[in-house]
Image (tube, rainbow, N blue to C red):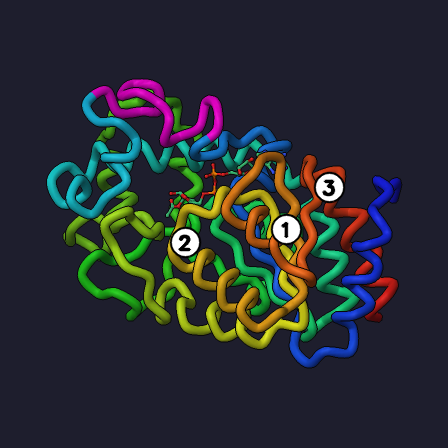
């Protein structure tokens, strides 16, 4: 693997974390999948910066679509948005950063935990294990019953709906395949909507917070730091002086927090270039 050179401070931080109890916790966001060709949320061309019509619904802006309020009023319109996004993600391939985290998990085993905000499923497709990957915002490939929160394992959405162009209208095939139970109501996407709260059963809220509290080191990759659970995770770790390294293209609340701390470091750049080098250095030091 060809790796980007990292500053000496990174090796020092990794070495200082090696003998601390707890796992390496890696927290990822949309930036890690940007080089796989998946739009981020708040960047140029991002899902939340788009206008109505740019991402599947002619009626509502994407940010308004991604809510329980919208789903309960117009489930088919909301499903079009998620099915379209799912087809974008399924056409994309995991990149070098996703693959490097798989290798790092293999090297560290139970000293590794991945917490991802991404619903694109690329970490799992690259080979990250189900047991050590918490998908805290859900997964676009899955659906679940809207009336039984946390009671069933979300099911795979049928492959027959994989090809979903932006302009495709919701049809009888989708209506049939997305049913919760025979003759029942429509299932919902297995994704946290804006007007919903995290919980443990579906989104691993408590487990993720505890992991951050007990981490030997926290590595944050490609997130603007706008959501609640990641914000709490990073703040808890920082309050305990846990070594914190943030890899991001732009400034964020997390880069500012890391820069303010003695045991913090910011690596500005693209995840697919930096994460392989970071993963290799950690594996070499900790294994
Ligand atoms: P954002 O779109 O808010 O932020 C992406 C971050 O990745 C930005 O800070 C970019 O600078 C950075 N970035 C972009 N390309 C990068 C690259 N190649 N390498 C490294 N960094 C790069 O996405 P998130 O922070 O993931 O939630 O958004 C968090 C959550 O907000 C999402 O999971 C979604 C959204 O609402 C739900 O849908 C529930």
Q: Which mark is residue 107?
A: none
Q: Which residue is mark 2?
A: 138
Q: Which residues are magenta?
A: 43-58
Q: Which residue is mark 1?
A: 259
Q: Which residue is mark 3?
A: 96
| Element carrying mark 1 | helix
Q: Is residue 110 left or right of residue 224?
A: right
Q: Earlier in the sequence, mark 1 or mark 3?
A: 3
Which of the 4 image quarters holds residue 114?
A: bottom right
Task: Give the label, 1 or 2, closer to the camera.
Answer: 1
Residue at point 70%, 56% (across, down): 102
Per the model, the C-alpha gap separating discs 1 and 3 is: 26 Å
Dot 1: within a 10 Å radius of its alpha carbon, few (fewer than 14), some, or many (20 or more) residues? some
Residue 54 lies in magenta, yes or no? yes
Q: Which residue is situated farthest in the left direction here?
A: 73
| Element carrying mark 2 | strand
- Residue 205 pos. (x, y %): 40, 67
Q: Taken as a whole, is the magenta stretch helix, strand or loop?
A: loop
Q: Nearer the viewer, residue 46 or 141?
A: 46
Q: Is residue 12 left or right of residue 119?
A: right
Discs 1, 3 touching: Cβ within 8 Å: no
In the image, the residue with mark 2 has its CB under 8 Å from the nearest atom of ligand 1: yes
Per the model, the C-alpha gap separating discs 3 and 2 is: 22 Å
Residue at point 44%, 41% (across, down): 159
- Residue 116 pos. (x, y %): 52, 54
Which of the 4 image quarters holds residue 111?
A: bottom right
Residue at point 19%, 43% (across, down): 71
Q: Nearer the viewer, residue 239 or 284?
A: 239
Dot 2: within a 10 Å radius of its alpha carbon, few (fewer than 14), some, or many (20 or more) residues? many
């Amino acid at each position: 693997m060809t790796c980007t050179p990292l500053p000496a401070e990174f090796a020092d931080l990794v070495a200082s974390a090696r003998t601390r109890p707890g796992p390496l916790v890696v927290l990822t966001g949309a930036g890690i999948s940007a080089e796989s060709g998946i739009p981020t949320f708040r960047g140029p061309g991002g899902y939340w910066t788009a206008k109505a019509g740019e991402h599947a619904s002619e009626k509502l802006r994407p940010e308004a679509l991604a809510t329980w309020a919208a789903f309960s009023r117009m489930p088919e319109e909301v499903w079009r948005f998620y099915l379209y996004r799912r087809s974008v993600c399924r056409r994309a391939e995991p990149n070098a950063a996703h693959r490097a985290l798989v290798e790092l998990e293999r090297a560290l085993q139970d000293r590794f935990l991945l917490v991802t905000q991404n619903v694109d499923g690329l970490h799992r497709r690259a080979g990250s294990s189900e047991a050590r990957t918490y998908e805290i915002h859900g997964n676009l490939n899955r659906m679940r019953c809207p009336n039984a929160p946390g009671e069933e394992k979300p099911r795979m959405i049928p492959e027959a709906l994989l090809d979903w162009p932006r302009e495709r209208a919701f049809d009888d095939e989708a209506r049939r395949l997305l049913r919760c139970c025979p003759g029942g109501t429509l299932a919902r996407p297995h994704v946290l909507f804006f007007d919903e709260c995290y919980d443990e059963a579906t989104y691993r809220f408590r487990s993720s917070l505890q992991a951050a509290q007990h981490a030997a080191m926290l590595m944050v990759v490609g997130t603007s730091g706008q959501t609640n659970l990641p914000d709490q995770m990073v703040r808890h770790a920082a309050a305990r002086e846990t070594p914190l390294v943030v890899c991001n293209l732009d400034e964020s609340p997390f880069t500012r927090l890391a820069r303010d701390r003695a045991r913090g470091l910011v690596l500005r750049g693209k995840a697919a270039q930096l994460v392989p080098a970071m993963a290799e250095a950690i594996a070499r030091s900790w294994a």
